[in-house]
Amino acid sequence: MTERVPPPSLPRSRAESRRRGTLAAAVLAVTLTILAAVLAGGPGTWTSRAVLRPAAPIAPAVLVPSAPRLQVQVVASPSDLILGNTTVLTALPAGGTPWYSFDWAPLPPGCATLNLSSLSCTPTTAGTYHPGVTVTDSAGQTVAATTGTPLYVNSSQTRGPTSGAGSLLSVPIYLFAGLVGIGAAVVSTLLILLLTRRRRRRQPPVPFSAHPYVPPRETDAR
């Protein structure tokens, strides 16, 4: 019988080196295949991209100035009238944020409120009144005011207050002008008389003659 002799075995270190080389070649082949597919960009492939976007700019802070305080002034023209006549009430707003709305109150009897800056008012009852208005701007600020000068509504020709300095202001303008004209005429007449008298006193006296003038007779002339 013939004995079989087993083939000589390779050293363990050489066999392990071959196995590692084969594994490395397989990994390299797979990597190259994936890289080729990615570069080709064909269907069924996927890519991973990192997109860097610039950060959004930060808007600077804007300081909005606050609106000035709302104010209003009320004027009645004329402020002194006879019953049955008409006066005009005017609101003069300042500051705040336009536009404005107007609510007139209080008002004399016979006058109705309107959302207007100027209001025509015809009182139906005599008396002294203080018309007022409430103004609101577009930002919601509200302010109320009344006329600085009272509104006098008289039932006769006598107007305004009857005592103190106000009585002088209540005199009609034509009567006041007539009184001033009369006073100026009287003063001018007195000055003329005074100057005339002084001139007469300064004139020299007429010399007196002791021999009066005698006209000649007809006989003497012959």
Image (spheres, rainbow, N blue to C red):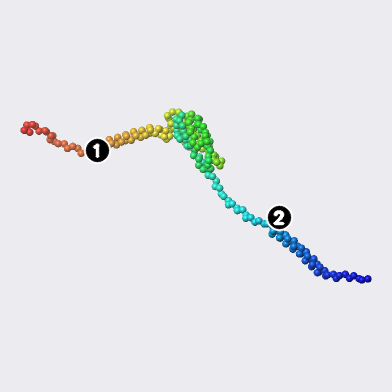
Q: Amino acid at mark 1?
A: Arg
* Residue 222 percent location from the top left of the image: 6, 33
Tell me where residue 188 appears, x and y as whole percent.
30, 36
Q: Residues within 10 Å of mark 2 (few under 14, many from 20)?
A: few
Residue type at mark 2 is: Pro
Q: Residue furthest right?
A: 1
Up/down of 203 relative to 65, above or below: above
Residue at left offset 53%, top offset 44%? 68
Residue depicted at x 49% and y 39%: 92
Disc number at residue 199?
A: 1
- For residue 139, side relative to residue 16 (left or right): left
Q: Nearer the viewer, residue 38 or 2?
A: 2
Q: Is residue 175 visible?
A: yes
- Residue visible at 78% across and 64% down? 23
Give the left or right position of residue 218, taking residue 165 as reference: left
Residue of label 2: 43
Comes first in the chain, label 2 or label 1? 2
| Image label count | 2
Quarter of the image that includes the N terminus: bottom right
Q: Nearer the viewer, residue 104 or 54?
A: 54
Q: Is residue 93 above or below residue 12?
A: above
Q: Would you say residue 154 is visible in this rendering? A: no
Where is residue 8, by image quadrant? bottom right
